[in-house]
Amino acid sequence: MLILECPYCGVKAEETELAAGGEAHLKRFGPGSSDDDFHDYLFMRENPKGVHFERWRHANGCGKWFHAARCTMTLEVFGTYTAQTSEPTQEIKDKIAAKRPGWTWREFADGQK
Amino acid sequence: MKRYSVFAVAREALRYHTGWERAWRSPEPKRHYDVVIVGAGGHGLATAYYLGKNFGITNVAIIEKGWLGGGNTGRNTTIIRSNYLQDPSAAIYEKARSLYETMSQDLNYNVMFSPRGVIMLAQTEHEIRGYKRTAHANQQQGVKTEWITPERVKELVPIINLHGPRYPVLGGLWQERGGTARHDAVAWGYARACSDMGMDIIQKCEVTGVRVENGRTVGVDTTKGPIDCDKIGMIVAGNASVLSEMAGFRLPMESVALQAMVSEPIKPCMDVVVMANTVHGYMSQSDKGEMVIGGGTDGFNNYTQRGSFHHIEETVRALVETFPMVSRLKMLRQWGGIVDVTGDRSPIISKTPVQNCFINCGWGTGGFKSIPGSGWAMAELMATGHSPLTEEFSINRFKEGKFIDESVAAGVAH
């Protein structure tokens, strides 16, 4: 059972109290952007075997959206943090780097985003 | 390969079964193959089989990081049906279903295909309209399905509760030639036939890199050393994103855990497959007597091959409503598999941005039933560069907006 701490109300919520919202920190492309950018924004997903950043909503609680950093291989939770940011906080990045040596933020094979 | 037959059984019975040979060889990898298939699950083995059978390409290696058929091929609920609405899905699933009918004879391996019939229950007005529409579409597509009344449902499934506490059964979509098959035997049968054609099945060999030169694939690096090849087929379900990243492209794909479970064995009580999609549960009875139950997927990415506990509760609750007699059954085993779900919830069978690299993934919850059809189409695509069955399942459909709006691989009972 996945347990995440809501960074707003501080409640340690288990997963039936939460709603998963998919990959976090997608860069949004809309009108005026290229077809490729719009396509990637809508459909391409990182889907890593390892460190992953996600959006979650404390649906059956305070109702607020927040971010979580999680490992998809071990289900280990590195931490949760505010939604008002376009990339993970330095504290979370440091925590992950300590546990997963060699990990860096945003290294895609095709060099996008 | 020694053929299996009644005479073989009799002969072996007389000599204490000492003459049976291994069903497939376990060779060390050669340095070069014409085709390397990554993933020795049902889809990968079927692709290799039809490459050999239909196109005479037998210099093939099938590389598997675990053991043969140990991924989703061994983790599904073995249901086979083809009652889909959209033409591309109906075409490939009906191809698969029709190949299942003669698979035991083709492979000389008993896959125990049991065309016992599949009912999808309609439990809301919306579902009635949806399934009637599907039945009409299936008539046009040449797939035999029909709309049946609640009375007929009760006749086919005496243990069902038509007047459930939440949703009554208002009818159903009935596919008489749908059913189940022995999932392991499908993988084993294909493996034996592939090995017999001279293909190498290399287990416990993980691909660690895909070598690309000038936009073309030239080989793979594995834990058993590098292997050169002219063409690669990536057929690895939940790990497709990991492999595509090695080749340098991304996929419109997320991997989630899907669960299933079986009960203790009981006497025969239900001889069809029943899917209750409004309440999210489906059930059939295996030949051993276990009730085979399909659950739901989690909403978050996961590679651990185990799912969340509360989904088991949801599934079981739905089934207790629909079949009150299962309320006292003990569950024997529960497991999870990692399913790959695309943006439009339909599979991808396609060329990729890398030349001579082909991908077959995104089957989500619709994988087992499509094995022979998927293999047939993928083999045609890899051998000739074109297959009518795969045209609509191209990776480019997301760019073009040509989605297959059906959720064949949605990740829930549907």
Image (tube, helix red, strand yellow):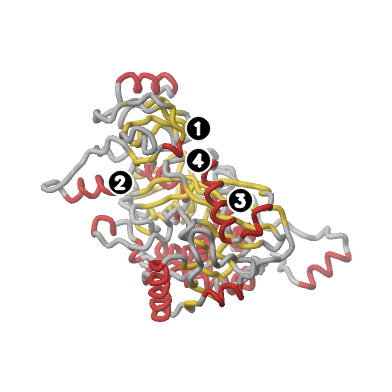
Real-space CA distance between mark 1 and mark 2, rounded to the nearest whole angstrom: 23 Å
Real-space CA distance between mark 3 and mark 4, rounded to the nearest whole angstrom: 34 Å
* Label 4 Cα crowd, 10 Å radius (few <14 / some 14-19 / many 20+): some
Disc 2 and disc 3 on one polypeptide chain: no
Disc 3 and disc 4 on one polypeptide chain: yes
Left-right relation of B212 to B152: left
From the viewer's perspective, is residue B61 above or below residue B285? above
Where residue B218 sits: x, y (%)?
39, 48
Disc 1 and disc 2 on one polypeptide chain: yes
The residue to which callout 3 is attached is B261
For the residues carrying marks 3 and 4, which lies nearer the camera in this image? 3
Name the disc covering residue B222, or none.
4
Viewer-proximal residue among B273 and A50:
B273
Residue found at x 64% / y 73%: B105
Q: Quadrant of the C terminus of chain A?
A: top left
Subunit ID for the residue under disc 2: A
Subunit ID for the residue under disc 4: B
Left-right relation of B159 to B227: right
Where residue B26 sits: x, y (%)?
64, 50
Q: Quadrant of residue B364?
A: bottom left
Q: Earlier in the sequence, mark 1 or mark 2?
A: 2
Disc 1 and disc 4 on one polypeptide chain: no
For the residues carrying marks 2 and 4, which lies nearer the camera in this image? 2
Q: Amino acid at mark 1?
A: Thr
Residue at disc 1, secondary structure:
loop
Disc 1 and disc 3 on one polypeptide chain: no
* Label 2 Cα crowd, 10 Å radius (few <14 / some 14-19 / many 20+): some
Q: Amino acid at mark 3?
A: Met
Real-space CA distance between mark 2 and mark 3, rounded to the nearest whole angstrom: 32 Å
Observer able to see residue B388: no
Residue found at x 55% / y 67%: B162
Name the disc covering residue A44, or none.
2
